[in-house]
Amino acid sequence: MWNWDTQSSNYKDLKQKSFETSGGKAWLVEVGEPLSPFWIEDSLKYTAEFDPENSGYGGDPMGPSALESAPRT
């Protein structure tokens, strides 16, 4: 948030607090237009389905597949 009186921002503190609150399991997405959570989910599911080794999901041969492990909105 920009403080016009002090000409400063607490963005760095807000960002750090968000990462700490999430236990390091959050993303920082900066956009200047509306972004649908379904777009993010679809992108993750596409990568998990068509490039499971590089998706970061799954990986345990006895566990769920990458696609089943990908986050859902």
Image (cartoon, rainbow, N blue to C red):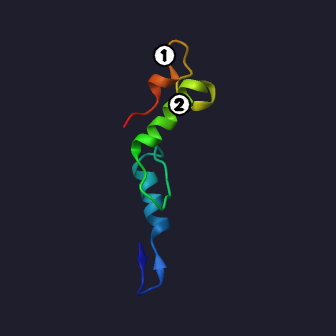
Camera-nearest residue between 22 and 58? 58
Q: Residue at position x 48%, y 48% from top?
A: 27
Percent of width and height locating residue 57: 53, 28
Percent of width and height locating residue 67: 49, 24
Look at label 1 and name its amino acid: Gly
Task: Name the secondary structure under disc 2.
Answer: helix
Which numbered mark, 2 or 1, is in the foreground of this view? Answer: 2
Look at label 2 and name its amino acid: Tyr
Question: Which callout, 2 or 1, points at the residue further toward the start of the chain?
Answer: 2
Q: Residue at position x 61%, y 27% from top?
A: 51
Q: Residue furthest top?
A: 62
Q: Residue furthest bottom?
A: 5
Question: Which residue is denoted by mark 2 in the rendering?
Answer: 46
Measured Cα–Cα span from mark 2 to mark 1: 19 Å
Camera-nearest residue between 35 and 7? 35
Q: Is residue 26 above or below residue 3?
A: above
